[in-house]
Image: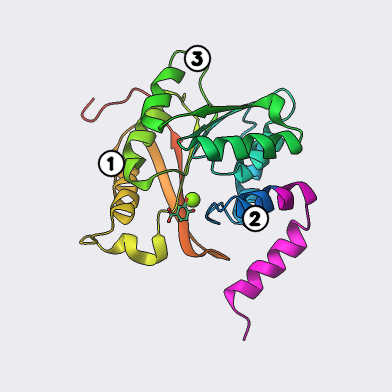
């Protein structure tokens, strides 16, 4: 009986195939001792396709890690596009910078080093982002979602990673602060009138998890308004 790992391998091989640039980025990340918590290839390509389907030109990513998903977004926005990616850990940002350089997309990516809560307010006042991917410290999910709406426009696509956490998200009493963050993120997407959202469970090489998908319906809607 095939397992979900066999399916992941089949889907990845068949639909994505090998990519020396991405392989090199992951090897550099591994060699630097970073955790292998980047999005799985099938999910990275899902995000890439979503970006193209939305015809997004300006993408905001919270949580760069080694830049694996960043490369997928950079390829999706095209030569005229822009990806702004926020990374709290300077060493990760250095690694991501080298990976993006090797991938030939540094011209369209800006890495902002700092905590999301500090960097996001500095982005206000610019052109709105077309797509926002939130994949950083889970405890701050609601802060990041709030900024995703503020920095977006009606129609901005928002994706929140890791909302299932091996099913633990269904446990309202969980002591795990990352799971609490996932729960609060989903609850905010359900209750906040600025968003319309759903979520999908995923099973891939990283195990059982999920992504929430939302659209900003009105960046300035307020409850009761
Ligand atoms: C963790 C973070 C992630 O963004 C992810 O995709 C998987 C795990 C973590 O911090 O445990
Ligand atoms: Mg993640």
Q: Earlier in the sequence, mark 1 or mark 2?
A: 2
Q: Position of residue 148 (x, y in %)?
A: 42, 31
Q: Earlier in the sequence, mark 1 or mark 3?
A: 3
Q: Which residue does the numbered mark 2 point to in the structure image?
A: 41
Residue depicted at x 50% and y 21%: 128
Q: Position of residue 33 (x, y in %)?
A: 56, 53
Nearest the viewer among 220 and 15 is: 15
Quarter in which the C terminus is drawn: top left
Residue 72 is drawn in which quadrant?
top right
Q: Of tags 1 and 3, which is closer to the observer? A: 3
Marks 1 & 3, CB-CB < 8 Å contact: no
Give the CA separation, mark 2 to mark 3.
31 Å
Q: Is residue 9 left or right of residue 14?
A: left
* Residue 53 appears anywhere in the view: no
Q: Secondary structure at mark 2?
A: helix
Residue 107 is drawn in which quadrant?
top right
In the rendering, which numbered label is found on residue 191? 1
Q: Could you classify mark 2 by the number of other residues whose Cα lies within 10 Å: few (under 14), some (14-19), or many (20 or more)?
A: many
Q: Secondary structure at mark 3?
A: loop
Q: Position of residue 151 (x, y in %)?
A: 44, 23
Q: Earlier in the sequence, mark 2 or mark 3?
A: 2
* Residue 152 appears anywhere in the view: yes
Residue depicted at x 66% and y 52%: 26
Q: Main secondary structure of the magenta part?
A: helix
The verdict on residue 23 being magenta is yes
Nearest the viewer among 216 and 34 is: 34
Q: Which residue does the numbered mark 3 point to in the structure image?
A: 126
Q: Could you classify mark 3 by the number of other residues whose Cα lies within 10 Å: few (under 14), some (14-19), or many (20 or more)?
A: few
Which residues make up the magenta segment? 1-24
Q: Secondary structure at mark 1?
A: helix
Q: Position of residue 22 (x, y in %)?
A: 72, 49
Q: Of tags 1 and 2, which is closer to the observer? A: 2
């Amino acid at each position: 009986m095939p397992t979900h790992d066999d399916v992941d391998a089949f889907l990845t091989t068949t639909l994505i195939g090998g990519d020396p640039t991405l392989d090199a980025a992951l090897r550099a990340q591994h060699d630097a001792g970073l955790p292998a918590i980047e999005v799985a290839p099938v999910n990275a390509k899902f995000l890439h396709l979503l970006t193209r389907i939305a015809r997004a030109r300006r993408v905001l990513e919270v949580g760069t890690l080694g830049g694996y998903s960043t490369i997928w977004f950079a390829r999706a926005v095209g030569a005229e596009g822009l990806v702004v990616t926020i990374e709290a850990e300077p060493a990760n940002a250095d690694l991501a910078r080298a990976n993006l350089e090797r991938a030939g997309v540094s011209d369209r990516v800006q890495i902002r080093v700092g905590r999301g809560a500090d960097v996001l307010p500095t982005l206000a006042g610019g052109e709105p982002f077309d797509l926002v991917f939130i994949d950083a410290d889970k405890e701050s999910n609601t802060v990041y979602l709030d900024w995703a709406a503020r920095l977006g426009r009606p129609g901005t696509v928002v994706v929140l990673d890791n909302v299932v956490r091996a099913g633990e998200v269904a446990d309202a009493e969980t002591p795990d602060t990352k799971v609490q963050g996932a729960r609060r993120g989903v609850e905010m997407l359900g209750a906040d009138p600025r968003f319309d959202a759903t979520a999908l469970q995923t099973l891939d090489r990283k195990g059982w998890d999920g992504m929430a998908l939302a659209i900003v319906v009105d960046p300035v809607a307020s409850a009761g308004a």
